[in-house]
Image: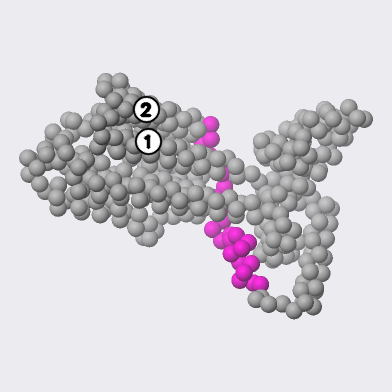
Amino acid sequence: MDFLKTIAIISVFILFLLILFLLTLKSNKKFPNQLFAGYLFLTALDVSGVFIAEPVISLLPNLEIFRWTLILLNIPLFYLYVLSLCYEDFQLKRKHLFHLIPFVIINLILASGIYWADGIEKKYFFKHHHQTFEMITFQYLIEIQYLIYTIATFTVLKRTRSIYLENQSYSSNLVFKWLFQLTVLFMVVHYFATLKNMLRYTDEHQLLTVINGFLEIMALLVTSWFVLKALKYPEFFRGVDPQLQLINDFKNETEPKTRSEAKQNIDNSNINLQIELLNIYMAEKKPYLDPALTVQSLAAQMNMPTRELSILINSNMKQHFFDFVNTYRIENAMELLKKHSKKDSTVLEILYQVGFNSKSSFNTAFKKHTTLTPTEYRNTYYKKN
């Protein structure tokens, strides 16, 4: 038990260091950092139960019970953190108070049955709380809430990533990787904690001790990972413009229900002409050299409605805007890699010249297009020539 307390104390200490780092970091993502700091603060309070529960129970039993219920604010806070990173103008509104409903419900239940109970009843509650109606209800609320918010988080990530691919030409892998890793990690830790709570009703006390130890070590590793990530990537990525929509959202709004065959032929002819003009513009003007090119900025350059251009590329050309632009960048990079005048240029220098701003995204896109890495492509070309 002393070992578990030591691990928990170290974890809480690291969490508070990370909270301080997030709150004092100069960043244009200050609000998301504050939300994540709030999430980490509630996590620290939860972990601290390993070493503060006994003295708090004897002095302020109601405060200890209230501390348990704060876990119902954790996953909503993480969900709001995801929203704040994904959407650049995210702000808390009155509607977000609905996230407090499970927390309020359980505290109202506890108020009538536990908070106002006398000392003897409270002692009985702490001794047998896992078998009481209030705590069983509490466990059900946690599991239902966690399932709903996990699904909601993955839905937001999937939709936001699709919007990025359809409207922007720069890589957003970093943020999605970070948020996806966090969500999966929290799922693993949560369900281990659920297993631990279920074992309390069995005779598997040795296994319960092992899982307790595992969870505390996991908490220490996770908090250390948070610190390393925060130090390496103090700023994450651009938020999605909240005005942007997925192609399927507004394509159905503008398409007529039925079309005559003649009308369809005219439309197809117009689409083919637009595609040809777009490809000519891309080849001659090379807008893809701008690493921050978006479908809006390209549409403005071509004096074309953004929706029309977005549908043309993402729907009619069957490509995400992200892949469409990167195809031109890769073709340009292939030309530069073959030029003798660029023989002394590094791959890093070339990727910046053609509009990429990330070595990993350039390598991934290049290999997808050629089945070779940039270095392999260059070496293969010079061997043949």
Residue 284 x, y percent position in the rendering: 84, 53
Q: CA distance from mark 1 to mark 2?
A: 9 Å
Front-lying residue, 235 or 81: 81
Is residue 277 rendered to the left or right of residue 137?
right
Residue drawn at (34%, 37%) of the image: 195
Residue 294 x, y percent position in the rendering: 67, 53
Q: Identity of the amino acid at label 2? A: Phe
Front-lying residue, 2 or 34: 2
Front-lying residue, 278 or 213: 213
Q: Identity of the amino acid at label 1? A: Phe
Query: Label 1 belongs to which residue?
Result: 192
**Magenta-drawn stretch contains 236:** yes
Q: Is the image coloured rainbow, by chain, by secondary structure, or in one colour?
A: one colour
Residue 96 x, y percent position in the rendering: 38, 57
Query: Label 2 belongs to which residue?
Result: 214
Residue 124 placement: quadrant: top left
Residue drawn at (17%, 42%) of the image: 62
What segment carries the magenta color?
232-255
Residue 56 placement: quadrant: top left
As drawn, 39 above or below 268? above
Q: Check contact, mark 1 vs mark 2: CB within 8 A.
A: yes
Secondary structure mainly formed by the magenta segment: loop
